């Protein structure tokens, strides 16, 4: 019953303790994680925006430089001069020395025919009149094309400027090496999944992407989703993982530079941080669980121990209360009986005297009468013995304070009983702790206690055995143990042995059942105690605890 109660209590304490510890732990862990995740996300996004913008500026600068040099050349040369191939070749050489990345250079007249050309292809005389870019440069004055295949069947784009020279209108046109251009764009990609490319207004790749597609393929990206400046978008691609795209419009307003990254890679740092946090929390949780269970168990054990000690003390208290009440009652009865017994003894004495007179000498019942009187006297004597031992004890309740050597007292008592014991072939040995102190106590009462315990032990052993007496010393007590190897005291009898008049020794005038009661009461009065341990079939040990009181110096 009690253990169930303790188990329940233990469970409740553990559960409450864990909840109190875990709720704040999980709460702080979650809050920290989400705070951190938010910050991390912001940082990643800011970084991608920055990279996209910076790369767009680099590309813008590249285009601006090429356009500026081409415009400067057109402004500073005459159509007529540039028709000479060596002049044009020299110009081409200077342009590449100054800026680079030009693949060829051509001069086109107002009817769209290329009149002069330097470069790797044979394009002199080519007719561009019907091409869209030609119309555009004629109307706008400057034109940068999208990337296209054209005559040469490889991706490239052109920059063209229109010049007006009196009546003559002509066009200077250069092709830009798309390899160098791609290189600049590509330098922006980072990581395992990062990519950087340019798409035009229709979403066609202007530079080759690193994954999923070639130059001039449709990218599947709708450039209208991106606003002016730099825009960050999350796109779910058909082929799986969501990607983050940071797109920046270029100055020409036709092209969009896109930096793209797979979300998972960008979140790798975050996942790592989360795993570390989870690890720390798990270790913390394990520590909390172990500590809670350990502390609770200890507390419950302590509680159980104190509880059982308390109930043992309680039982002892009840026992000594009961014994004291019984003792008072018995002493009262003894006192009441004492006077009638005296009267009876006096009267039987007188009756015995009377029987000696002549008139009774001849009575045929004389012997019968004498026997009866003797029987009365025997039983009255027995009753008086009981009464006396009770009254004698009651009279001298308060113990005296004299110098007592416990070891000596024991030896004296053993000497008194030795002969009696030897008759039944019982040996009494004594084993004493060294330097037992002389204490202030009542020697007569101690002797009475030892006497009772030793005679009980002799009675219990009956024949052929050993009784051991051991003394021990603690800080506050001298302990005397009387150990016999008799039959022991059965469990159901153990509670009763200290009660007055409890005896198992019937027949004759052997036992009155007062020995243990008197001894118990003496020890209590003295501030010590008397208890025993007994196992049926093995023997009994009575323990006398005598308080150490150092005698005052006289
Ligand atoms: N060492 C022991 N071994 C076994 N039983 C014991 C022992 N000491 C006491 N008892 C039991 O306890 C009972 C009570 O003992 P107690 O000394 O009070 O009375 P008693 O010995 O029967 O009579 P009295 O001591 O008054 O002559 C005994 O009758 C006996 O049954
Ligand atoms: Mg006895």
Image (cartoon, rainbow, N blue to C red):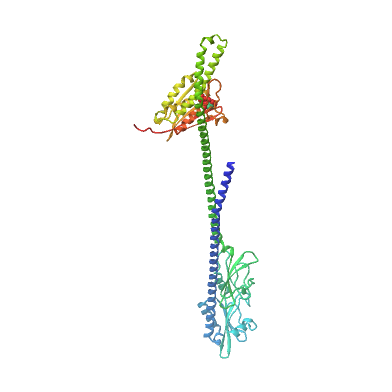
Q: In this orientation, which residue lies closer to the viewer: 320 or 11? A: 320
Residue 91, position in %: x, y? 53, 81
Residue 154 makes an appearance in the image: no
Residue 59, position in %: x, y? 54, 74
Task: Kindly identify the residue that appears in the image at 51 percent across and 33 percent down.
Answer: 325
Residue 470, position in %: x, y? 46, 28
State the residue lying farthest toward the front. Answer: 359
State the residue lying farthest toward the left. Answer: 554
Task: Kindly identify the residue that appears in the image at 53 percent across and 70 percent down.
Answer: 50
Q: Quadrant of residue 490?
A: top right
Q: In this orientation, which residue lies closer to the viewer: 209 or 168? A: 209
Residue 229, position in %: x, y? 56, 75
Q: Would you place residue 1 above or below residue 104 in this image?
A: above
Residue 448 makes an appearance in the image: yes
Q: In this orientation, which residue lies closer to the viewer: 68 or 436? A: 436
Q: How many marks?
A: 0
Q: Point out the image quarter for the C terminus.
A: top left
Q: Quadrant of residue 124?
A: bottom right
Q: Would you place residue 508 above or below residue 142 in this image?
A: above
Q: Would you place residue 78 above or below residue 253 in this image?
A: below
Q: Point out the image quarter for the N terminus.
A: top right
């Amino acid at each position: 019953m009690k253990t169930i109660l303790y188990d329940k209590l233990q469970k409740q304490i553990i559960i409450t303790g864990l909840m109190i510890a875990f709720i704040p732990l999980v709460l702080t862990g979650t809050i920290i994680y989400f705070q951190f995740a938010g910050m991390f996300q912001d940082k990643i996004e800011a970084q991608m925006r920055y990279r996209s913008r910076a790369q767009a500026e680099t590309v813008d600068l590249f285009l601006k430089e090429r356009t500026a040099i081409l415009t400067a050349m057109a402004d500073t040369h005459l159509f007529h001069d540039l028709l000479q191939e060596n002049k044009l070749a020299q110009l081409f050489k200077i342009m590449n020395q100054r800026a680079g990345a030009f693949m060829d250079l051509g001069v086109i007249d107002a009817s769209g025919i290329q009149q002069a050309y330097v470069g790797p292809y044979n394009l002199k005389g080519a007719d561009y009149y019907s091409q869209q870019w030609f119309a555009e440069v004629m109307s706008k004055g400057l034109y940068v094309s999208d990337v296209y295949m054209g005559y040469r069947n490889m991706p490239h784009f052109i920059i063209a400027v229109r010049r007006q020279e009196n009546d003559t209108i002509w066009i200077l046109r250069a092709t830009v090496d798309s390899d160098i251009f791609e290189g600049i764009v590509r330098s922006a990609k980072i990581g395992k999944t990062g990519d950087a490319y340019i798409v035009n207004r229709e979403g066609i790749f202007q530079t080759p992407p690193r994954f999923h597609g070639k130059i001039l393929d449709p990218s599947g990206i709708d450039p209208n989703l991106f606003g002016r400046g730099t825009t960050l978008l999350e796109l779910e691609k058909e082929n799986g993982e969501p990607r983050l795209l940071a797109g920046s419009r270029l100055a020409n307003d036709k092209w969009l530079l896109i930096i793209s990254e797979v979300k998972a890679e960008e979140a790798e740092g975050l996942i790592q941080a989360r795993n570390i946090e989870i690890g720390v929390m798990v270790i913390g949780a394990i520590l909390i669980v172990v500590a809670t269970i350990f502390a609770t168990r200890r507390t419950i054990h302590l509680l159980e121990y104190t509880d059982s000690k308390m109930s043992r003390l309680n039982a002892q208290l009840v026992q000594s209360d009961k014994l004291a009440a019984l003792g008072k009652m018995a002493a009262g009865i003894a006192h009441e009986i004492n006077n009638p017994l005296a009267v009876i003894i006096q009267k039987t004495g007188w009756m015995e005297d009377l029987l000696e007179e002549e008139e009774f000498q001849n009575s045929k019942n004389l012997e019968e009468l004498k026997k009866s009187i003797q029987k009365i006297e025997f039983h009255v004597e027995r009753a008086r013995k009981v009464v006396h031992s009770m009254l004698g004890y009651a009279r001298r309740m308060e113990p005296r304070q004299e110098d007592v050597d416990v070891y000596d007292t024991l030896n004296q008592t053993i000497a008194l009983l030795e002969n009696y014991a030897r008759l039944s072939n019982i040996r009494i040995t004594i084993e004493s702790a060294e330097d037992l102190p002389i204490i202030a106590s009542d020697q007569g009462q101690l002797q009475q206690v030892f006497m009772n315990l030793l005679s009980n032990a002799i009675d219990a052993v009956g024949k052929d055995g050993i009784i051991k007496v051991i003394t021990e010393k603690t800080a506050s007590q001298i302990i005397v143990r009387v150990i016999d190897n008799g039959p022991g005291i059965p469990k159901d009898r153990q509670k009763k042995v200290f009660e007055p008049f409890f005896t198992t020794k019937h027949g004759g005038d052997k036992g009155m059942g007062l020995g243990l009661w008197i001894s118990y009461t003496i020890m209590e009065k003295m501030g010590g105690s008397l208890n025993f341990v007994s196992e049926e079939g093995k023997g009994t040990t009575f323990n006398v605890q005598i308080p150490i009181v150092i005698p005052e110096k006289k």
